[in-house]
Amino acid sequence: MHEVAEHFCNAAFESDFNWISKIAFFQRTSTMLILVVHLMDNATPTVDVYILLDVMQKIDQVSSPAAFLTWSLDMRQHYPSEIRRKFEQYYKNYLGYFGHRSQIRYNRQFVEILDYLGDRPSARVLEVGCGCGSESLYFGLVGAEVTAIDVSPKRLAVAAFRKKFVEKNLQLTANTEFKNQNILDITKKESFDALWLEQAFHHCEPRGEVVAAIAQLLKPGGRVFISEANPWHPLISLGLFLKRGTKTIKTYLDEDGNERQYGNERIITKSGLAKNLADVGIKEEHFRYFNVFPNWRIFDGLAQHEESYPKIACLHSHYNFVGIKS
């Protein structure tokens, strides 16, 4: 049995797992070994075996962002009708198909921030544009102290319900607080180790004020992690042009009746983003293009080759940018 345990541990250390996946791996492996020993000693399973199996299953649900979202998609049948309707509307692109390659694509967005949280598991994180809360809940489940803001009360209602649902059904604590707030309204006394904007920066306006707020809210040495669609990808740009035309800024009324600006899929190039942030004292620390093919089942066979394509801007549909405040 010791040789088996040593084999599992060596395999994990030599793998490309991020720190969270490794923790889940070790937890699951130790639970599995306990279960094997128990079965060897007991011909008839006892209630303890079922408890161990339940623990293994719960560990699996938080082994990666994609695993957590998969579990959430499966659990939506237990949501109240209005919460479920809004949830399904928000995640409609994943409802029809969220297979192996889709999950790889989804997890690629989080490589940099999960590596960062691996060294700072209790970091204070602000997510801007949290939507229905998947990423904020996941970060809170793995140890970060998360404040998640959005301007949509309906999406926040889904996120708040999901937090209670997750904590009840997984028996884990999500250290996440959801707020109906615009980034420009956060008190300047607040400060964070990291800001996370996943497909959100292109909605944030006025852009100059937003980047200034990002710099103000970051602690010295703090990071901003931005995951965006790539304007140099021809299909991305064509699709967005057909969807919204040339009107890239709209207005809306907030909860207090104030008129606000809203970016209408106003995507930005990496160089444009880097310049905006450099102007407020945030320099580029890391940059990466990712995802070549659309999220369609027919491309599943190419999943293992996707990361080997040349990092040419027009080939990749998305990019991640990491900036550090000096």
Image (spheres, rainbow, N blue to C red):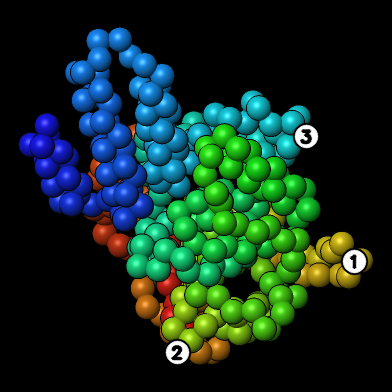
User: Label 1 neighbourhood size at 10 Å, few (<14), some (14-19), many (20+)?
Assistant: few
Residue where numbered disc 1 is placed: 256
Q: Which residue is drawn at 59% across and 79% down?
A: 191
Amino acid type, residue under disc 2 in the picture: Ser
Disc 2 vs disc 3: Cβ atoms closer than 8 Å?
no
What whole-number distance in Å separates the C-alpha atoms at marks 1 and 2? 36 Å
| Residue in front for this viewpoint, 19 or 230 | 19
Residue where numbered disc 3 is placed: 82
**Residue 153 visible, this angle:** yes
Q: Does label 1 or label 2 sit earlier along the sequence?
A: 1
Amino acid type, residue under disc 1 in the picture: Asp
Position of the C terminus, as image quadrant, is bottom left
Q: Does label 3 or label 1 sit earlier along the sequence?
A: 3
Q: Which residue is drawn at 57% across and 62% down?
A: 146
User: Label 2 neighbourhood size at 10 Å, few (<14), some (14-19), many (20+)?
Assistant: some
- Farthest residue, direction left: 3
Position of the N terminus, as image quadrant, is top left
User: Does residue 117 appear left or right of residue 171 in this picture?
Assistant: left
The image position of residue 152, as x and y in percent, is 76, 55
Task: Tell me if residue 106 comes above or below residue 122 in the rendering.
Answer: above
Residue where numbered disc 2 is placed: 326
**Residue 112 visible, this angle:** no
| Residue in front for this viewpoint, 309 or 171 | 171
Amino acid type, residue under disc 3 in the picture: Glu
Task: Tell me if residue 218 comes above or below residue 196 in the rendering.
Answer: below
Q: Is mark 2 on a helix, strand or loop?
A: loop
Q: Is mark 3 on a helix, strand or loop?
A: helix
What whole-number distance in Å separates the C-alpha atoms at marks 3 and 1? 24 Å
